[in-house]
Image (cartoon, rainbow, N blue to C red):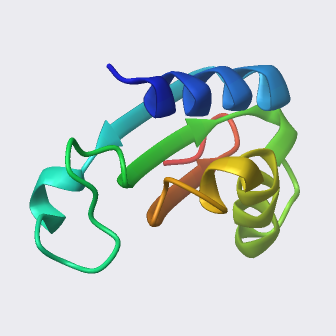
């Protein structure tokens, strides 16, 4: 994986201590579209499960993830799809 993937993984792991973390670089599906970068690492899908999300509304969970990744979202990441779950949710 690349440096941006690694940064996303490391920051989410540090911020949320997830019990499940899936990161998919979906950039190849967006080649030629706005924000697509040569070499990928511009569009990601993230599924994260953490106790930190328990009792928190869905939009607030997404904001928490976006805040943890604010540096990446301000630069190389054009699009980020987030599915943030508390343990036991699907």
Residue 55 appears left or right of 27: right
Give x and y (percent) for residue 60.
82, 68
Along the line of sight, the residue nearer the viewer: 38 or 22: 38
Eyeballing the image, is 63 above or below 27? below
Eyeballing the image, is 41 above or below 50? below
Residue 69 appears left or right of 76: right
Residue at figure coordinates x 57%, y 39% from the top left: 48
Looking at the rendering, in which quadrant would you find the N terminus? top left
Eyeballing the image, is 81 above or below 86? below
Residue at figure coordinates x 58%, y 46% from the top left: 89
Residue at figure coordinates x 11%, y 61% from the top left: 29
Give x and y (percent) for residue 6.
51, 21
Along the line of sight, the residue nearer the viewer: 17 or 67: 67
Residue ranking furthest to the bottom: 34
Give x and y (percent) for residue 61.
76, 59
Residue 79 appears left or right of 14: left
Eyeballing the image, is 73 above or below 51? below
Give x and y (percent) for residue 63.
78, 65
């Amino acid at each position: 994986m690349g440096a941006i993937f690694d940064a996303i993984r490391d920051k989410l792991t540090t911020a949320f201590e997830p019990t499940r973390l899936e990161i998919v670089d979906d950039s190849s599906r967006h080649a030629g579209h706005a924000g697509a970068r040569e070499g990928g690492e511009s569009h990601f899908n993230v599924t994260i499960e953490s106790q930190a999300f328990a009792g928190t509304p869905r939009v607030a969970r997404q904001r928490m993830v976006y805040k943890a990744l604010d540096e990446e979202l301000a630069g190389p990441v054009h699009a980020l799809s987030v599915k943030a779950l508390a343990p036991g949710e699907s």
